[in-house]
Image: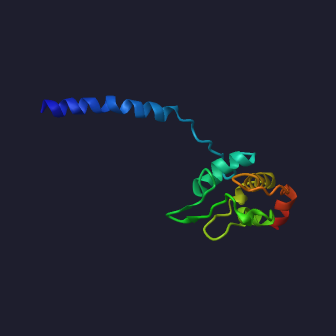
Amino acid sequence: MTIRLAACLMLPVLALPAVASAQEAPAPMLSPASTFAETDGAALFANVCQACHMPAAQGAIGAGHYPALAKNPNLETGAYPVYVVVHGLKGMPPVGRMMNDDQVAAVVNYLRTSFGNSYTDPVTAKDVADARN
């Protein structure tokens, strides 16, 4: 009985390091209302895209199929990723509806120049506006 009591009293002490490290982690950025607050491509990717496409854009298969964006030849033509972000495709929701044209251009340009992609012809806000119509 005393061993069980001692074990029960030690559990909160043993859990303190885990609680302390969880409290030190930065809080995620939450966007207000139905639009995203982030303005640059890296922040948009980190807060919108990487939950499904993974931090290194390597994609994932599990509860769904999330294609890799790293070294992706489909990103060569800027119009394709703009269309997908704005209108969605298969299981991907149209997250571009929660972004303005500059935000869509920023995240698409970030993807097209990061993660082993080197497509340097930039997408503009006008390109995104045209794709919305």
Which of the pair 131/52 is nearer the observer? 52
Query: In this rendering, is residue 10 above or below 111?
Result: above
> In the image, residue 3 lies at what x, y percent?
16, 31
Which of the pair 76/105 is nearer the observer? 76
Mark yes or no: residue 29 visible.
yes
Q: Is residue 126 left or right of residue 112?
A: right
Which residue is painted at 50% across and 64% down in the image?
Answer: 63
Q: Say which quarter of the image contains residue 132.
A: bottom right
Single out the residue that lies furthest toward the bottom: 90
Mark yes or no: residue 132 visible.
no
Q: Which quadrant of the figure contains the N terminus?
A: top left
> In the image, residue 100 lies at what x, y percent?
77, 54
Query: In this rendering, is residue 93 above or below 24?
Result: below
Which of the pair 17/133 is nearer the observer? 17
Q: Is residue 2 left or right of residue 69?
A: left
Query: In this rendering, is residue 24 above or below 57?
Result: above
Which residue is painted at 38% across and 30% down in the image?
Answer: 16
Which residue is painted at 69% across and 53% down in the image?
Answer: 115
Q: Is residue 108 left or right of residue 66?
A: right
